Image (cartoon, rainbow, N blue to C red):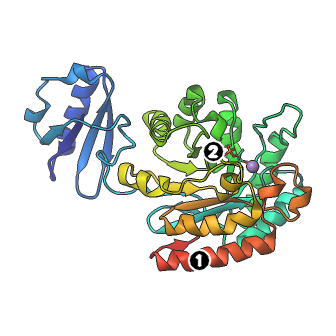
Amino acid sequence: MIIVMQAGAAREELARVVARVEELRLKPHVIVGTERTVVAVVGDERAADGRGFETLPGVASVMPILAPYKVASREVQQEPTVVTAGSLVVGGGRVGVIAGPCSVESREQILATARAVKAAGATGLRGGAFKPRTSPYSFQGLKEEGLRLLAEAREETGLAVVTEVVAPEDVPLVARYADVLQIGARNMQNYRLLEAVGKCDKAVLLKRGPAATVEELLLAAEYVLDGGNRRVMLCERGIRTFESHTRFTLPLATVPWLHARTHLPVVVDPSHGTGHANLVTSMAAASVAAGADGLIVEVHPDPKQAASDGAQTLDVPAFERMMDTCRRVAEAVDRRLG
Ligand code: PEP
Ligand code: MN
């Protein structure tokens, strides 16, 4: 249910509505917009039926939230959410670019990559320190040492650090070093992990599961929002289909579809979405044209030597060319890259 406050409602009137919602053991999410303040009431709404919220002072109207996700929905917040984390801005006409290797491998590798992607216009640095690998025998990441190296790269370049957290118990550790916590595709429906990052003060990049619908993605985001963390970015990274010419199938209609239903910004990952370095630039450009608020792209100084995902990883010159192309596309759709 959405309780829409009157334009000039007093703070005490809002406090009274919030207290009333809490009395009913429901959860109020206060959303202060430029035009109006609303209280999104979540929980078993049957408890609120017939409780006369309409007649409380300061209340303009009460209406149901029709979407199954609530706080994520456009019904609750019309203005798009802009997520800012250090140097990274995603949304509001800015197309944030998060670039870097699949995995942090060494000090030299991450520093060289950070310098190069920064010079090319990236605004965030990616790099996995805790890697969710399909095989237990594959490189699992440098763990805390990887996080330290990412923090050193941020220190030098100013780039915001985006890195994955794979388990709820690791959230405090990863959050000490990262600016953005990435929830990987395999963990999109790890609800305990979503709750843990929901209570954290770092921005979240939530990747779509390869077999999840976009509605399930929004419901996963709802866990994070419901925990109190509003800095959530959604990420389309491709889904599993019968197709085999690409590693995953990258459905870009996700971008405008999500924009119509949620205020959360949408990032596209053309690296995992295609699995082939030679397809990345085209799909990055197409993502920007489709209205993406951000890109996350794998870049390595020497992709052939990469410990993971080398085949889909751009080298530095290719990333520079990608940025050049995307910058021009962004301009054509009235946005700014970086
Ligand atoms: C990654 O970003 O390197 C990664 C593991 O991505 P995904 O979770 O989308 O597979
Ligand atoms: Mn990867």
Name the spot of residue 233 as percent of width and height, x first.
52, 50
Nearer the observer: mark 2 or 1; the answer is 1
Can residue 170 be seen here? The reply is yes
- Answer with the quarter of the image where residue 66 lies: top left
Question: Residue 83, position in %: x, y?
Answer: 50, 55
Are the two marked residues, 2 and 1, in contact with CB atoms closer than 8 angstroms? no
Give the amino acid at mark 1.
Arg
User: What is the secondary structure assignment of the residue under circle 2?
Assistant: strand
Secondary element type, mark 1: helix
For this orientation, the residue located farthest to the left is 55
Q: Earlier in the sequence, mark 2 or mark 1?
A: 2
Q: Assess disc 1: are there few (<14), some (14-19) or many (≥20) residues with their C-alpha within 10 Å of its C-alpha.
A: some
Bin the neighbour count of mark 2 within 10 Å (Cα to Cα): few under 14, some 14-19, many 20 and up.
many
Q: Which residue is mark 2?
A: 181
Residue at 36%, 54% in the rendered image: 260
Q: Residue at x 28, y 25 (%)?
A: 22
Q: Which residue is mark 1?
A: 327
- The amino acid marked with disc number 2 is Leu
- Image quarter hosting the N terminus: top left
Q: CA distance from mark 2 to mark 1?
A: 26 Å
The answer to whether any part of residue 108 appears in the image is no
Q: Nearer the viewer, residue 25 or 186?
A: 186
Q: Residue at x 64, y 43 (%)?
A: 242
Residue 253: x and y, percent? 48, 56
